[in-house]
Image: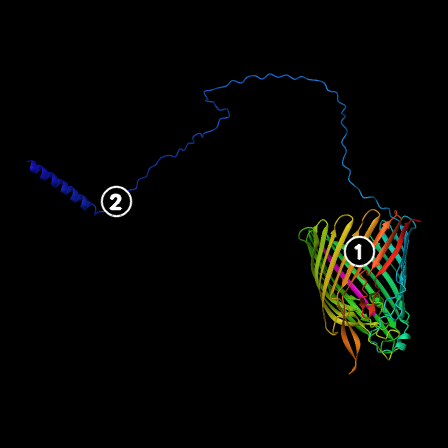
Amino acid sequence: MQILSIKRNLFLLSFLCGGFLFAQDKPLGGETVIVVKPYTPSVNDAFKIKETPVVTDSISLEKKPVKYSIFSVPVASTFTPSKGQATKVERAKRVKLFNNYATLGFGNYSNILAEFYSNLEVNRSDNFGVFLTHNSSQGGIDGVELADKFYNTALNLNYNSRNRNSSWTTELGLQHQLFNWYGLPENSIFTRPDIADIDPQQNYYSAIVGGEIELYDSFFDKASAHYRYFGDSYKSSENNFTADAEFEVNIADELITTKLSADVLNGKFDRGYQTPEELKYSQMNFALTPSLLILRDDLTVNLGASFVYGLDTENSDSNFYIYPQVTASYRVAGDYFIAYAGLEGGLNQNTYYKLAQQNPYVSPTLTITPTDKQYDASLGAKGKLSNSISYNLKGSYVAETNRSLFVNNLEEPANTEDYTYGNSFDVVYDDLKTLSFFGEINVDVNRDFKLGMNATYFSYSSDFQPEAWNLPDFKASVLADYQITDKWFAGANLFFTGERKDRKRFMNPADGTEIRTITLDGYADLNANVGYRFNEQLSIFVKGNNLIGDNYQRWSDYPVQGLQVMAGATYKFDW
């Protein structure tokens, strides 16, 4: 029985196990159970430090009361508080202004400098002014065979009136200049007796009369007109009349300006350099220049154009020109960085007077014609590096037609005038393109010391002439002004001019003579002055010019005076 019971149990166990294994081969069905319970969150109180914690220390010390008393003893005091005062700002002493002054100075080479200025008050609104200046030298340059003295005397009389609505000025100017053609070439083809017969003196005479008027509350802004006569010792004469008027109209908060101008020129030379025939010239230029000024926060733009009609009455020729007159500036970083650009042009009238002021050794046999400046494109930046340092950088490209150039006159044996010994200059014209870069920096070290430096590099491209005659490839200058004390003052300046090109005739044993291009060396000219003020009216000064002492040549075969020293005095006064 027991054995049967065991067998029966084993059979049931094997049956259940076999059924289980058999059931694993059949997949179970999936069931989805959804439990629904409302979400009732709760926030437990965080642990907080109580403002008045309970001390659980078993040892508690009782605070003992502190008792104190003040033993007051009276002390005698003589202190009396004073009222506060504001700090005083140091103000510069007001300089008294005088209406008149006179200057007189003497130096080596028999140099004389004289100036006189007087401003007479006719009434509260009218003034009459007189200005007289004289600068001369008796010469004495080493190695110069001909007389090299010069004179320059000018007198200007003016009368001006000003009231609430307008102001006007009239003037009369007279000028006399004396120069000598002393620049003989080293290897001249002329003999010594021929040179001894040369009278190199040339006199220039000039007279100008004109006036200006300005209206403050009118669309007619201002106008001016001037007439100048210019002549010399060789019967040359020139008449030049210029006038311009400017109108301003404000439309929709924009300023529109229109300028009208006229330039009438007429003159003659007694003869040509190689011909005895009289040379005449006559030109008339009329221009209309409208422009629109646009101001937008940091942006300033001037949009304009110039319409010019040029008439050459001597040759019965006329032309019409249109020139751009566009400038713009933008304050990129306030006063520290201002970018600017421009595209401008114009018809510039050349005159005998202007050319003689640039080079007084020209011959009275010139060809006069205007210069057509087609465009002057410029791009630059200016501003200040600090409150005491300012700068200016600019690059420009200029295209000109009939640009005037000074060139040495070659010896002319067939003409026995005193300026035909290779000792004078002619004016030739060429189509010239000029690329230049300019840089300037000014430093106000303090209230008493100021320093300025600038430099310009030039690159020229000429179409007809072999070179851009007598134009420098580089120019630079340094200027300094120092107020040493209330009594002492000083100043200095250094000018540097680079190389220039000119032409000269040379003797050639094989072919007789030949014309060559020469290079004039660059030069530096250092000038300085120091002065002492005795009082507000009287001061003395000492000036030194060309302190390096180099007899450099500003023009070919024209050495300048060496080291020059001048002493003088200035007196200011009132009538």
The span shown in magenta is 283-295
Q: Amino acid at mark 1?
A: Ala
Q: Residue at x 81, y 44 (%)?
A: 92
Query: Is residue 216 found left or right of 435 in the rendered image?
Result: right
Query: Is residue 444 found left or right of 1 in the rendered image?
Result: right
Question: Label 1, label 2: how many angstroms apart (C-alpha)?
Answer: 111 Å
Residue 330: % across, % down: 68, 54
| Residue 322 occupies quadrant | bottom right
Per the image, the residue denoted by label 1 is: 492
| Residue 82 occupies quadrant | top right
Residue 319's label in the rendered image is none
Residue 241: % across, % down: 86, 65
Q: Nearer the viewer, residue 289 or 160?
A: 160
Main secondary-structure element of the magenta-colored stretch = strand
Circle 2 Cα neighbour tier, 10 Å, few/some/many (<14 / 14–19 / ≥20): few
Q: Residue at x 51, y 17 (%)?
A: 62
Q: Nearer the viewer, residue 468 or 565?
A: 565
Can you say which quadrant of the picture contains the N terminus? top left
| Residue 558 occupies quadrant | bottom right
Viewer-nearest of labels 1 and 2? 1
Disc 2 secondary structure class: loop
Per the image, the residue denoted by label 2 is: 29
Q: Is residue 382 visible?
A: yes
In the image, is residue 101 above or below residue 357?
above
Q: Residue furthest right?
A: 575
Task: Indicate whether residue 554 is drawn in magenta.
Answer: no
Q: Residue furthest left?
A: 1
Q: Amino acid at mark 2?
A: Gly
